[in-house]
Image (cartoon, grey):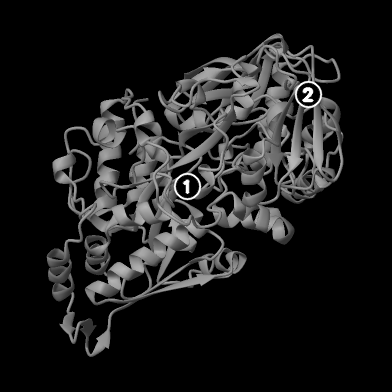
Amino acid sequence: MMDGHDNSELNGQQFTRRRFVQAIGATGLAAGLAGCGGQQAVDDTPTESNSDVESTSIDVGDESLGLIQELAYVTNQTLPVLPLQEKLAQSFQTTDDWNVPSKDSSKIQSYWPTEWLPREGEWTSANGSDDKRLTLAQWAVPADSQYNPWNAKNFAEGRRMMFDRFMEYELSSQEYRGYVITDWSLDGKTLTLNVRDDGVWHDGSSITATDVVNQLKLDIYTGGNLGEFVAPDDEGKVADRITAPNKTTAEVSLVKAFNEDVVLPYIQPKYLSAHEGTYGEFVTRLDEAGSQDERSTIVGELTGMAVTDPVGSGPFQFEDADSQRTLLTKFENHPDAGNINYPEVEYRYKPSNQSRWNALINNETDGSATLFMPSNKLRQLPDSVQVSLIPRHWGLGLLFNHEREPVNDVRVRKAIAHVVNREAVAGNSGAGTNSKIAVTYPSGLTSEFSGQVEGTWLKGVTNQFETYGRSTSQTEKAAALLQDAGYQKQGGTWKKDGNPLRIPIKGPSGFSDWVAGAETVVSQLKQFGIQAESVMKDTSTYWGKDYSNADFVVGLQGWASYNQSHPYFHFKFLFDSSDAANSWNMPSELEAPVLNDQLRDGQTVAPASLVSDLSTAGN
């Protein structure tokens, strides 16, 4: 997703970049794109170090680990996508008038620091400071913003302070922490959520488990991914699948006994916004609807409703908005209000990367959740602005259309992988910020920055995986693969039956970091003798036509599920998603060597089946 404009919680669904562009529409497109790559830096002087991110290891069961490694091996050996790099997001905090944790503190490692640190008393006004208003930025025009999470248009940035998330997810340790949901348990098919008993809506009413139930129901009725785990009844309803047996307990009935690591990521990021007075009637009507057509009509009403005077659940409440800023004031009855020593939060209208860069440089804003800033701009920041780096668990990849020649041949895909110097791609697309790191093992696994690929996910089996040359082109291996596929090098160009090997790479022109990465790949392929070219399209055209209609040979796309870190989500995206089926024509079966013969008995494999097994592994 674009750094700085994370709409991944919308409708409870995972939004790809393509779906994000469709959701914000033409008027919001330029603003959204600004958060992704921004402008190219004029030089490549490093300004930040990846060494601030600690190496960590997490616990994973033997059955889960075996499936993860097998899926990683299938990905490594068949290359449905060539992962090029993994990224860090830059997060900004000012320290002149504010007390904030150091940039390498684990307290920064959450999505997003601007919403969690104030609640925890870790972003406070410094003693003696005259600044009593925390000032941040928002993409959409404040007066045009709205606060209905099921209406994807202009869902305002102020939601981060106005609504409480269900849980916190600490990235460095990959641990969940309670918040609205204080505790949870998964017993077979029943997920029990314990709700804090001191929450208060901004109208003074108490927050109860019924509010949590309503939030989950509306998310599922509007198409949220949690619906894959909570089976509706024969009439398409979830009324008796999600219930509140008492004021502090919500129970969710699942289709089967899923792995907790798979279920919780769909619960954790949700904002509690389903206020009874605003949304209760929709829940009742959807629960009682007599047909799918009736439900569709009600969902249409819900998703078309713009809420401009919201009743929130967070530590700040809506005050007013005009063309330039949204003003929030502290809600004194919030259980964590005592941790906050300033009365206001302001979101100023900053619709481009350049305006956000200048706001930080000129001390107009006090921080940014996440924003890409190239090195030449970083050097203009005052000493009082610290830059933290947050793992994003995804990055730029080359996506192969499996129904288009020549990349429908795995030998050609592997040859490309051997030619591409991923280190150079990461360096050029990072624009001197060290915020991109080359993928060591193209396998669909993330956590390169924290050492978990080798230290956890592939521990003990890395020698079985092909690196394809991380920083050095392995042209001899590439040549052997192309020769085996029937190509010969003639006059410096690889040809088959007299026709040159052509690799056009399509992508969105608005994502400058991706464009830089693609141009680097094209240069490397050309030098090897492949007629490669960069075909950058208008961003909305690329996602709305070329990508969605599978009109490409090689396309640019994120190669992992940016919204979660667990490998299940990355492999589901690669092998069992609508994108995989419709955009890159992923076949249901692949031919791949076997890593663990206890998991499969032949080289023909259906990866989606392994992904399904992973969702319940260990239960």
Name the residue at the bottom extreme: 498
Q: Which mark is residue 344?
A: 2
Residue 224 picture quarter: top right
Picture residue at 16% right of the left edge, 66% below the top: 475
Q: Is residue 66 left or right of residue 398?
A: left
The percent position of residue 61, horizontal first and vertical second, equals: 30, 25
Picture residue at 77% right of the left edge, 15% below the top: 200
Q: Which mark is residue 111?
A: none
Picture residue at 68% right of the left edge, 12% below the top: 336
The percent position of residue 455, horizontal first and vertical second, equals: 25, 30
414 versus 118 height, above or below:
below
The percent position of residue 49, horizontal first and vertical second, equals: 38, 36
Q: How many marks?
A: 2
Residue 230 picture quarter: top right
Report if the CB atoms under discs 1 and 2 are less than 8 Å apart: no
Residue denoted by label 1: 375
Cα separation between marks 1 and 2: 32 Å
| Quarter containing the C terminus | top left
Where disc 1 sits, the SS reads helix
The percent position of residue 242, horizontal first and vertical second, equals: 64, 26
Q: Is residue 295 left or right of residue 510?
A: right
Does label 1 or label 2 sit earlier along the sequence? 2
Regarding residue 234, the answer to whether it shows in the image is no
Three-letter amino acid code at the position of disc 2? Glu
Q: Closest to the observer: 267 or 15?
A: 15
Picture residue at 80% right of the left edge, 28% below the top: 328
